[in-house]
Image (cartoon, rainbow, N blue to C red):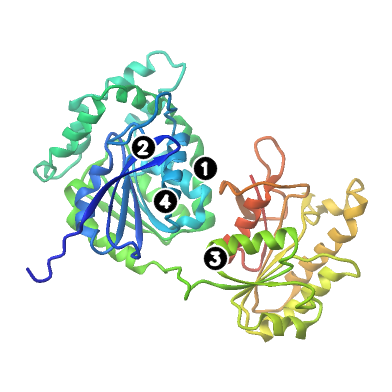
Amino acid sequence: MAGLTIPRVAHRFVDVDGTRVFYREAGPADAPTLLLLHGFPSASHQFRRLIDALGSRYHLVAPDYPGFGHTEAPEGFRYTFEHLTDVVEGFVQALGLERFTLYAFDFGGPIGFRLATRHPEWIAGLVIQNANAYDEGLSDLARGMTANRPGVEGAAERVREILVLPVTRGQYEGGTTDPELVSPDGWTLDQHFLDLPGRADAQVELALDYHSNLALYPAWQQWLREHRPPTLILWGRGDAFFPESGARAYLRDLPDAQLHVFDTGHFALEEKLPEIAPLIAAFVDALPERTKESSMKIAVIGAGGNLGGAVAREAAARGHQITALGTATVDVTDADSVRRAVAGHDAVVVAVKGGDRLVPRAAEALLTALPAADVPRLVFLGGGGSLEYAPGRRFVDHENFPAQYRETALDQGEALELLRAADTALAWSYVSPPPVHLVPGEKTGQYRAEARNTPLVGEDGESRVSVGDYVSAVVDALEQESFVGERFTVGY
């Protein structure tokens, strides 16, 4: 029949640190990828109809978590949301997925947001479907369930009461407009897996850990504010767990997100797939692609140094074209030298230090050279000494500031003031690390980045970040065109 395209769906396993992860995969490998993260108490089978609808046009990948579906977890597996995220992270790496749209439903929310904060560079866009990240998105029923946690008397028993067929079925049919449109296959298969040996114990462990997700809501909301990923929000307003207010709460942090609310329940795809699938297709089609043709060409001045080299490696790993510049190829204090070296680039990152006011002289040269070379973007790696420990009081000016670093810190502070005072169309950003604790370490993706003049501190009152996360924040600022005309700092 002309025009009829039906995808071939493969059903595979991959080993992730001893867990045999089952997944469904369809679509061309070079098409935009969607990673489909399922909810409770279901598994990747909940996406079968969506895969049929979109799998000939896009690359769809849907894993089963440990404790769900066909995935086989080793004996002694720890069923926490952090550990499930570890497995999904390893799964993504095992399949070589570098960038994708994340579809997060129910449990896919806490797993997906953990994944996104660890690897913001993976996220091309978000499809949020009844996956809550806000306090107002918790119904009284959900609050009662999240109150179950280790040490609470009767908590495990209360969780076991919901792992039965009537409750499983109710999650599918509750809130729907026409229950006849909801296939019984979903809840029947879910209950089959729930009744397998050991599965109820796994679900109890996860339920008692759910409170850990609520504690991370502020961090996820901040990540959304800072990264502003393109987002499509789909919501069944009849959801007994996550009411419509949870969907609308996302707009506080993602004012440009698309929001569609449907007269259905928690498993919105079951009843509203004909309306939802075209919205997802249109959303993915509108996402900007990162290809060799569209990647940025970035000149890194100071690429031979510790931080400049780390930025160059991180940007290259994300598919950007890097030109490494050092003293042999450019005089950063000479505007003509800089102009010649950076012409034809999309952005310049500068990480330099030295005597004779090298840093502020470099800032002056860059302010002249980049507009002359038609380079629109600059990220200047400055110091933490110009941050303030009290209003108007910089660390570099404190009597206890280490004398051996004072000259460099003062120069870096002068460079910041030159950028702030410049009457320029150049989209500059100045990034400060913590005043003391920029420490060796890999990228975790769990950092915070904010435009501010004071350090970001953690719960222990200390300002700290690894080099891996610091340079990740730098490349994020380039990719997202964030913190333009501002100083920002990074920390945990």
Q: Amino acid at mark 1?
A: Pro
**Spatial CA span between label 2 and label 4:** 34 Å
- What percent of the width, then of the height, locates residue 47? 24, 48
Q: Amino acid at mark 3?
A: Glu
Looking at the rendered structure, the secondary structure element under dot 1 is helix
Query: What residue is rendered at 8% in x and 43% in y?
Result: 180
Considering only order in the chain, which callout, 4 or 1, is on the residue closer to the N terminus?
1
Determine whether label 3 and label 4 are within 8 Å by CB: no
Q: Kindly indicate the quadrant of the structure image that contains residue 81.
A: top left
Considering only order in the chain, which callout, 4 or 3, is on the residue closer to the N terminus?
4
**From the viewer's perspective, is residue 414 above or below residue 457?**
below
Label 4 neighbour load within 10 Å: few <14, some 14-19, many 20+: many
Residue identifier under label 1: 218
Q: Residue furthest top?
A: 153
Residue identifier under label 4: 250
Q: Is residue 126 visible?
A: no
Query: What residue is rendered at 76% in x and 78% in y?
Result: 330
Residue identifier under label 2: 20
Considering only order in the chain, which callout, 2 or 1, is on the residue closer to the N terminus?
2
**Spatial CA span between label 1 and label 4:** 12 Å
Residue identifier under label 3: 479
Front-most of 474 and 142?
A: 474
**Spatial CA span between label 1 and label 2:** 33 Å
Considering only order in the chain, which callout, 4 or 2, is on the residue closer to the N terminus?
2
Looking at the rendered structure, the secondary structure element under dot 3 is helix
Determine whether label 2 and label 4 are within 8 Å by CB: no
Determine whether label 1 and label 3 are within 8 Å by CB: no
**From the viewer's perspective, is residue 347 above or below residue 457?**
below
Q: Amino acid at mark 2?
A: Arg
